[in-house]
Amino acid sequence: MILVTGGCGFIGANFLNWATREFPHEKFVNLDVLTYAANRMSVREAEERGNCDFRQIDLANEEQVRETIRELKPQKVFHFAAETHVDRSIRDPRIFVHSNILGTFHLLEACREVWGNHWEGKVFHHVSTDEVYGSLGDTGAFVETTAYDPSSPYSATKAASDHLVNAYCHTYGFPAKITNCSNNYGPYQFPEKLIPLMILNCLAGKSLPVYGEGTNVRDWLFVWDHCDAIWKVAHHGKNGETYNIGGASEKRNIDIVKGICTVVEELTGRKNLQDLITFVPDRPGHDWRYAIDFSKVEREIGWLPSTTFEQGLRKTVTWYLENSKWVESVQTGEYRNWIATHYQGEIKP
Ligand code: TYD
């Protein structure tokens, strides 16, 4: 049995929808607490296949986690569950500590107890971020040995969870692997993040709020390429090792936003969407640039991203155009409150 945590979130849902299709004889269980950014609709495809069960579990609740792991006795665990939005972590870090640090700790402990030092055939795959490495200047790229230097409360909690996983490998011989990825984009991403926010605002004719001058740089990884990398590392990577996963698509935020305007114009016939671009006050402590060297996973496992940014963006915009029901279902009161308080009138909720 394969356990997936956070399977109703963005990356977890894409992973489950893909893995249940690719591996129909495997049995999957999805543990998700269903916070604001998680949506059971995202995983309907996986659930309809019949090889994916769902449990509403809070990883921050140690007792619940222990009981669930004792009962399910998973062979493999893919740990996606995490609070991930940097801006929210700046406003209220507490939930990030609970979910990302304590949640990971409880899961590790429960697996350690149930697996009882019999690691044969067991896999614990911890999904993490390149933000643990901090910020880069105009050149260079993160490698797996780059010293951790997280800037935001979000990345600090992910760094802490990575350290716990590494410590379990080092101390107990725990069979874990870690992947640290660059910025993901694709279907089912909650529209608080740059790409889906801009797509939906283009469609609604609302302003496109670019922080600072829009010159910060991110590397963009199409989520299906990321899912493929995770599966490959989980099965062919070495225990106790970290693998960086990137999309080979470094872009400035302003170019991403302009690119979204162009694709939305092409696919919908709308015009002059760039006029909606509005420069808003910068994020406090905004990391300047992330870039990732993923030559280790390429060399040792043979994984490479297969989607160019242009292909991935077109697929993503098309997905948001075709899935208005899903979009409506995530634009709840909570979402509207976030937009109203965070953007202070720059976008109408
Ligand atoms: P985001 O999607 O929040 O991911 P991360 O902070 O983890 O990189 O943001 C991506 C980049 O886009 C980041 O440099 C901040 C910027 N950004 C904006 O300019 N405007 C926005 O409204 C958002 C949400 C992000």
Image: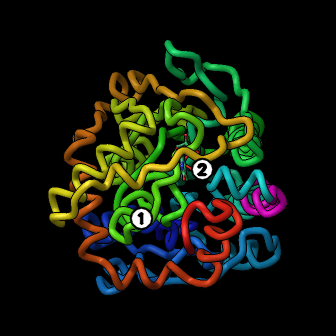
* Vertical order, 48 against 249 (above or below): below
- Indicate the position of residue 45 as horizontal and vertical percent values: 31, 79
| Res. 120 in view | no
**x, y (%) of residue 344?**
68, 62
Residue ID for mark 1: 201
In this picture, is 286 found above or below 70?
above
Residue 184 - label: none
Q: Which residue lies furthest to the top in this view?
A: 139
Q: Give the range drawn in magenta.
A: 92-103
In the image, taking residue 140 as reference, residue 326 lies left or right, namely left
Pointer 2: residues within 10 angstroms few (<14), some, or many (20+)? some
- Name the residue at 32% across, 71% down: 20
Q: Label 2: which residue? A: 119
Marks 2 and 1, how far apart in space? 48 Å
Q: Nearer the viewer, mark 2 or mark 1?
A: 1
User: Residue 321: which quarter of the image?
Assistant: bottom left
First reached walking from the N terminus: tag 2 or tag 1: 2
Front residue of 291/18: it is 291
